[in-house]
Image: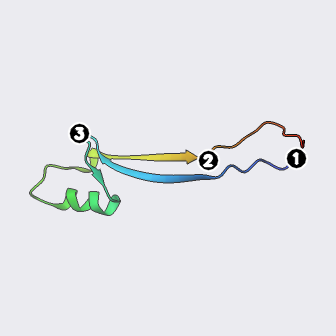
Amino acid sequence: MSEPIKIPATATEIVKHKRTGKVYADKAEFDADVADPNTDTTVDDFRQDLEIKVTKVSMGAQTKK
């Protein structure tokens, strides 16, 4: 059995407000918005996405010339 191919990638967590689309720096910032009595943000407004960027990889065979 051959070794699995490892592809270089980076993952970025994106925390958003569902209704407004506001992007937060992290979950803690969102939680602070929920706790703020001056906003109508609730825990149900939480949206979390994971963006994965994969480095371009050549999968073809190469020959020496």
**Quarter that holds the N terminus:** top right
Residue corresponding to mark 2: 55
Residue at 14% from the left image edge and 49% from the top image edge: 40
**Quarter that holds the C terminus:** top right
Mark 2 neighbour density, 10 Å: few (under 14) some (14–19) many (20 or more): few
38 on left or right of 10:
left
| Coordinates of residue 3 in the picture (x, y in percent) | 84, 50
Of all residues, the one furthest to the left in this rendering is 38
Residue corresponding to mark 3: 19
The mark nearer the N terminus, 3 or 2, is 3
Residue at 28% from the left image edge and 61% from the top image edge: 29
Q: Amino acid at mark 2?
A: Thr
The CA distance from mark 1 to mark 3 is 47 Å
| Secondary structure type for disc 3 | loop
| Coordinates of residue 25 in the picture (x, y in percent) | 32, 59
Mark 1 neighbour density, 10 Å: few (under 14) some (14–19) many (20 or more): few
Marks 1/3 in contact by CB < 8 Å: the verdict is no
Q: Nearer the viewer, residue 58 or 27?
A: 58
Q: Mark 3, mark 2: which one is toward the viewer?
A: 2
The CA distance from mark 3 to mark 2 is 32 Å
Q: Determine which of the numbered discs, if any, sits on residue 2 in the image.
A: 1
Q: How many marks?
A: 3
Q: Amino acid at mark 3?
A: Arg
The mark nearer the N terminus, 2 or 1, is 1
Q: Nearer the viewer, residue 32 or 52?
A: 52
Mark 3 neighbour density, 10 Å: few (under 14) some (14–19) many (20 or more): few
Q: Amino acid at mark 1?
A: Ser
11 on left or right of 20:
right
